[in-house]
Every structure is written in C-alpha cells, then in structure tokens.
Image: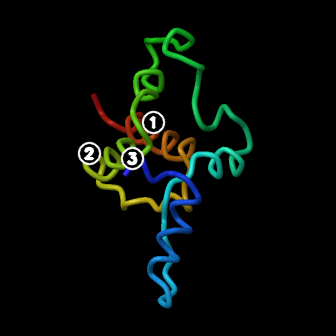
C-alpha cells in the first residue's frame, strides 16, 4: 500500500503484532535514498522534461518501483526481489539489462 511507506507505519505494525516478533518489509523512500550511493541510481531527471524521450529508461522512470519489479517477474521470469536486496536503481538496471538481452 503506497500510503504505508513511512518507518512509523512499520513500527506501528510491529507493535500491533506483539508479543510476536515479525519482520515487516516496507519500502521507505527516505531509507532507500540514504542507502543509495548517488541520486542518479534512483532516478534520472527531475521530471519528464529533463529526460531523453528516446531512451527506454526515460520511458520507464514514471513507473513505480513495484511496477518495475512486477515487470521483471512477469515479462522476464526473474525471481521476485526483496526491497532490502535491490533498490530502485538496481531494479531499473536489471530491467534494462533484460530488455537489452531481448532479440528483436
């Protein structure tokens, strides 16, 4: 759920499930940005106007990371990725590599 994308939400879910200890996986944009080496890994261009429309990456940028992960699984048969294992930049790189490997 896109509305549950803050670390406070993860904490409240964990507290609600106590005394059980559970790992709650939530994509928290701030944490991903801090984990990322550079802003360029996450997104290219501040808006569509700043991207080259001819590039496939530019066309994929508007899609959410969840949609990109789904496309990797559905269209290319990749295993589902855990948000902890791969950030948006890594998912985008994998997707572009898959498209690059396609025979036209």
Q: Tag 1: Cα neighbours inside 10 Å, few (<14), some, or many (≥20)?
A: some
- Which residue does the numbered mark 3 point to in the structure image? 66
Please report the residue visible at 52 percent of the width from the left and 40 percent of the height from the top: 93
The CA span between labels 3 and 1 is 15 Å
Tell me if 3 is positioned left or right of 75 in this view.
right
Task: Mark 2 or mark 3: name the one nearer the start of the chain.
Answer: 3
Task: Mark 3 or mark 1: name the one nearer the start of the chain.
Answer: 3
Q: Nearer the viewer, residue 91 or 84?
A: 84
Answer with the quarter of the image where residue 85 lies: bottom right
- Which residue does the numbered mark 1 point to in the structure image? 96
| Extreme-top residue of the structure | 49
The CA span between labels 2 and 3 is 14 Å
Q: Tag 3: Cα neighbours inside 10 Å, few (<14), some, or many (≥20)?
A: some
Q: Is residue 76 above or below residue 17?
A: above
The percent position of residue 61, horizontal first and vertical second, equals 46, 28
Instruction: Say if mark 2 contacts mark 1, CB within 8 Å.
Output: no
């Amino acid at each position: 759920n896109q509305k549950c994308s803050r670390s406070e939400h993860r904490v409240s879910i964990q507290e609600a499930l106590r005394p059980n200890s559970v790992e709650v996986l939530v994509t928290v944009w701030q944490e991903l940005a801090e984990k990322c080496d550079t802003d360029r890994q996450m997104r290219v261009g501040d808006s569509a106007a700043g991207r080259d429309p001819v590039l496939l990456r530019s066309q994929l940028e508007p899609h959410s990371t969840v949609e990109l992960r789904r496309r990797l699984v559905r269209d290319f048969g990749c295993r589902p990725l855990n948000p902890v294992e791969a950030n948006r930049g890594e998912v985008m790189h994998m997707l572009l590599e898959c498209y690059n490997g396609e025979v036209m």
